[in-house]
Image: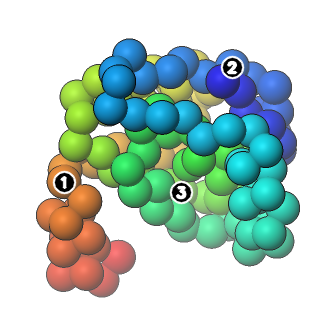
Amino acid sequence: MRVISGMYKSRLLKRVDSSNTRETMDRIKLNIFSMINKYLDNAICLDLFSGSGQIGIEAISNGSQLVYFVDNNNKSIKTIKENLKSLNITNKSIVIFKDYKEALTYFINNNI
């Protein structure tokens, strides 16, 4: 698995060692980011159900200033943190170990 565009293009990412997660295929990421890329400069993004963090990392690679990574799987959280550290972008991320409902409630209640 790799970053497909932006500043970190071609950098490899670790996969989550779990049968409960699936990585997003490169062509799907390419299609998504070709549509939203113009909105990413200095954006704040949410990668809900983060898995390995590849979608949020792609957003950072394409100019997002901050990404919230949310997942409720310990292996996913560990993998996200490893991937962020390997790219030296921990300062552009907040990793949240919560269920998606709890995380969304937190965001709403705190006007995030």
Task: Specify which label sits upstream in the sequence, 1 or 2.
Answer: 2
Depth check: 4 or 39 in front? 4
Sequence order check, earlier mark of 3 and 2: 2
The quadrant the N terminus occupies is: top right
| Above or below, comparing residue 56 to residue 10 in the picture | below
The answer to whether any part of residue 3 appears in the image is: yes
Q: Is residue 60 visible?
A: no
What is the distance, in whole Å, between disc 1 and disc 2 at their CAs?
A: 27 Å
Distance from disc 1 to disc 3, alpha carbons, whole Å, reads 20 Å
Q: Residue at x 54, y 18 (%)?
A: 14
Circle 1 crowding by C-alpha within 10 Å: few under 14, some 14–19, many from 20? some
Residue under label 3, please give it.
Answer: 66
Q: Secondary structure at mark 2?
A: loop
Q: Nearer the viewer, residue 20 or 15?
A: 20
Give the side of residue 97 with respect to residue 82, left or right: left
What kind of residue is marked 2? Leu
Amino acid beneath label 3: Leu
Q: Amino acid at mark 1?
A: Asp
Disc marking residue 62: none
Foreground label between 1 and 3? 1
Say which residue label 1 marks: 99
Residue 106 lies, in percent from the top left, at 19, 70
Residue beneath disc 2: 12
Residue 30 relative to residue 111: left or right: right
